[in-house]
Image (cartoon, rainbow, N blue to C red):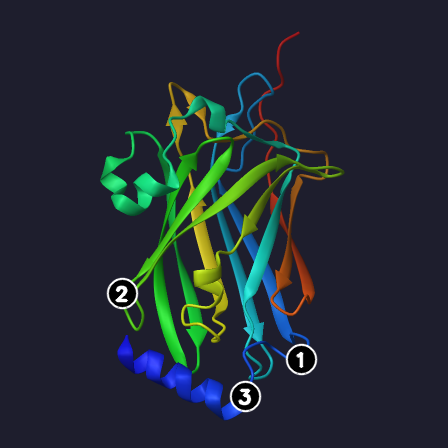
Amino acid sequence: MRKVALLATTAIAAVGVTTPAWAVNADQGIDVSLSPTKAGTKKKPAAVKIKVKTTTNPKDNVPFATREAVIHFDKALVFNPKKFKTCSASKIQASESSCPKGSKVGSGSAIGTAIGQTSNLKVSAFNGPKSKLMLHVTASTPLQIDAVIQASLKKDKGKYGYKLVVPIPENLQQPVPGVFATLKQFVTSVKATSKGVPYVGLASCPKSKKLHFGGDFTFTDGTKLSATDTVKCKPGKKSKK
């Protein structure tokens, strides 16, 4: 940790800046998968496991960090966070084991880079208060990282039914003051049920048999990038009238 901090201080002194001076130049991607892909009905959506993978691949060496991500979900998907027990950010950071049973709804991983150092992070997903998805991000090397991303699930519009607004905490944007960490990959898989109710359910499959997903990403210099993805689905049994 001291080694990285020393490298960071040296880097800051060498360039003489603490904020990115150029627009972000990167390839942004999003990849979504569902399992199973067969839909249920509006009254009984099929419980699914959803995996969202975002990638940011810089085209140059200009330092930057992700400030916010907004993930958009097809309107055929339904979310039921109010049916699940919740855990607060303070409890999660104190000890994940202190969270109520059933509040953990997923897991994942992430990769971040800063001044030539790569950090592989662990992600745990918990259902939080007020329809929040709490993403506990931790790492031990090269820096000790322990942060909770408090993402908000909100109604969306158009072809999307819900969106997850993900603000990145300052200590993930800059794990060492003045040094920006580029989040190159973030993967989260969510699947859970509570008394037969799925956290994420697939209620229908459109005529196109394609579900639409998207991501909008804002970086520390104000640059914005977007990406989209589609997932094939299968219609379920029609509800009896």
- x and y percentages locating residue 215 in the rendered image: 63, 53
Image vertical order of residue 215 relative to residue 205, above or below: below
On residue 22, the disc is 1
Amino acid type of the residue that numbered disc 1 sits on in the rendered structure: Trp
Between the C-alphas of marks 3 and 2, the distance is: 29 Å
Front residue (pair 10, 44):
10
N-terminal of the pair, mark 1 or mark 3, is: 3
Which residue bears the numbered disc 3? 16
**In the drawing, does residue 138 fall left or right of residue 49?**
left
Give the position of the C terminus as an image quadrant: top right
Between the C-alphas of marks 1 and 3, the distance is: 14 Å
**In the drawing, does residue 34 fall left or right of residue 89?**
right
**Nearer mark to the viewer, of 1 and 3:** 3
**Quarter-of-image position of residue 111:** bottom left
N-terminal of the pair, mark 3 or mark 2, is: 3
Which residue bears the numbered disc 2? 140
